[in-house]
Every structure is written in C-alpha cells, then in structure tokens.
Image (cartoon, coloured by chain):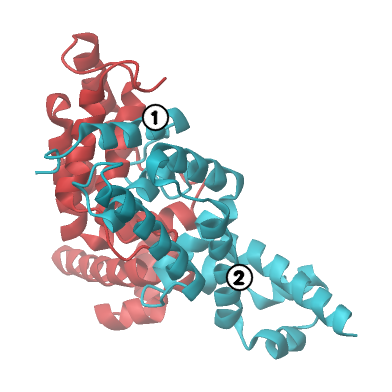
Chain colours: A cyan, B red
Amino acid sequence: MARSADETRRKILDAAADEFAQYGIAGARVDRITTTAGVNNALLYRYFGGKLELFDVVYSHHVTEIVEAVDLNPEDLPGYVGRLYDYYEAHPHVVRLAAWHQLERPDHAPPEAVRDAQAKKAEKIARAQKEGRIPADIPAEELRDLMVLLSLGNSPMAPSLGGGVSVPRRATVVAAARAVLEAGPGSTG
Amino acid sequence: MARSADETRRKILDAAADEFAQYGIAGARVDRITTTAGVNNALLYRYFGGKLELFDVVYSHHVTEIVEAVDLNPEDLPGYVGRLYDYYEAHPHVVRLAAWHQLERPDHAPPEAVRDAQAKKAEKIARAQKEGRIPADIPAEELRDLMVLLSLGNSPMAPSLGGGVSVPRRATVVAAARAVLEAGPGSTG
C-alpha cells in the first residue's frame, strides 16, 4: 500500500515536471497533470496541497539535482562551465523550470539544499583565491555566478533578447571562461 | 476622435506592458488590464483581437526599442555589453517580456525589425573581423550573442539557476567581454 502511494506520487511528479516545464505555474493545468498520471484531481490535492505547492516540490527536486550533479573544481572553472552547459543541454526541463520559478516566484527563496551547495562552491573558490591558486580580482560568489551565466549560452533562456538565432557554442563559452581567468588581476577595474 | 482612439490604444498598451511583464501571457488577466486602462473589455478585443495578439504587440514594441536604442560599435564590444547591461537594468520590464516570450512563445519568430537590426549588428562585426580590426576566431553572430549573454548578468533571468544571490557586476561583465576579445585566435579550440 505504501509502495503504491509512492508510485502514485512519482507518477504525479513526473507528469507535473512535464506540464510545468512547458506551461509554467499560471499556464499549467491540474487536469492535464492528473490525466497524464492516471489519477484523480482529489488525490493530487491530498498529496501536494495545490498547484503552487506541487510546482515548488518539482522545482526543488530538479534544481537540487543540478547543483549536486555538477561539481565545481576551483582550479578548473572553464571545465565547470562546460559540464554545466552539457547538463543544461541534456536537461532542458530544468532550465525552463528554473526560468518559470524566477519569473513567477521572484521572492521565493531557492531550496536550502541549493543554497548550501552554492555556498560551498563559493567557499571552494574563495579558498583557492586565498591560496593564490586562481586570480582573486573577482569576488568568489560573483565569479561563481559569472561562470553560471556563461554556461547558459545554449539554454532556452539565452540569448532571449534581440532575437539571436545562433547560440554561443560550448567551446566558445568554455574559452570565454578561460579568458576571464587568464586576464588576471586589474582587468575588472 | 482619432486622437482619442490613439490615447485609448496607448492606455491599453501601457497597462498591458505592466500586466504581461509581471504575470506573463497565461497569468495575465484582461480584466486587470482594462481596469487599469479605464476601458471596457470589448474595446480591448476590438483594438487588438485578444490577449495573445496584445502580448505580441507589446513584446514587439519593447524589444524593437532595445535593439534600436543600444547601438553596436564592433571595435568596442565591451562598451556594447556595458550599455546593454545599463539598458536592461533601467528597463526590467523588457527583460521579463522577452523571457515570457521565450518561454511561452518558443516557436514565434521575433519581429522583423528585430531580426533586421540583429543581422546588421552581425554584419558590422563580420566586416570588422574581415578587415582585421577585431579577432575573427568566433563567428560574428555567435560573438554578438555571447556579448548579449554577458550583458544579462544583472537581469532578472540570470543567474536563474542554482540560487545565486550575488550577480555579476557591470565592471565584471565588461571586463569579461574584454578578456574574450583579447584572448585572441586559437582560444576557442
């Protein structure tokens, strides 16, 4: 019985991930999610409370997966950019879920697991900077986020402005990350 | 009478820009737009056809404004990144409208004015590359879009992944653009 409840929950979550990735929170329809999952609406409300709460569960799950799947070696930040780029390409759902979250839940903090993982990444960078292993001219958190920005080159969100049709390729954003790190101190003046 | 129709149209467009920037297409409510504009729903449908058509008009207007407002000098691409960054910061609506468009209208081509302006920017870069005024290792369109990507450092869309709390500052993304250009040929291998 517990087993079956877990399976039902999993079916709802899978259907919800597809629905939210495509339509966002406002555009998602509970009916479509339950039809795909093969359950009735009442069960969804009983398990998750409502559409918004269901979104938060789906979002937290996927975004936590990224930050745990893609590790950061402070001495190879271009490699981090490349692996994030690959991850986003292989998991377009995640980028769309994160974008909807940013747009529709702007004041909603990311899950604690994500904040912890991101803080640890900044700490690794800060330590490498302090020990002189990598340039220290860009503060650790900002450097981490600049690398994330570069990794979004091929995401459905970028270049979202200006109607660009080409996208920065993997080799290009990895080289850009390398150039940033090799430019050295003083370059951000 | 024509004057009054123009004013009414303008009031609807202003109210719609606020509504769509905040809620997107699915989340926007025609009722709220017409209440803010002080008109009745029938008038909105008569002037614009429907909610989706109204979104397209608002989106086209704002995104065309960007590409025309922020000029590109191929010999000062870091300056282009800085001025785009400033523009996005001063016009957060535009970035949000573009993001909703990207998410909710993924197969809808950008307006012709935008495609033309962006094509001209790539041509300027290609000419400067051909004449040896700037490095030619990154194809012109891709270089343009990499610059756009960097300019999104402070936008509501980035870093949308991983829950970063800091954002890349203007000086940092401008320096990153400079580093990319100074790294020179062979760096994207």
Looking at the picture, tell me which residue is in the foreground, B129 or A122.
A122
**Residue B112 is drawn in which quadrant?**
top left
Q: Which subunit holds the residue at mark 1?
A: A
**Image coords of residue B53 (percent x, y):** 42, 58
- Residue that sits furthest to the right in the current view: A1
Earlier sequence position, callout 1 versus callout 2: 2
Looking at the picture, tell me which residue is in the foreground, A167 or A29.
A167
User: Quadrant location of the C terminus of chain A?
Assistant: top left
- Residue that sits furthest to the front in the current view: A131
- The residue pinned by badge 2 equals A58
- Residue that sits furthest to the left in the current view: A189
| Residue shown at 63% from the left, 74% from the top | A29
Determine which of the numbered discs, if any, sits on residue B130 in the image: none
Residue B63 seen in the current view: no
**Image coords of residue A181 (percent x, y):** 28, 37
Residue A131 seen in the current view: yes
> Same chain for marks 1 and 2?
yes
| Residue shown at 45% from the left, 43% from the top | A80
Q: Is residue A30 left or right of residue A144?
A: right
Looking at the picture, tell me which residue is in the foreground, B107 or A18.
A18
- The residue pinned by badge 1 equals A172
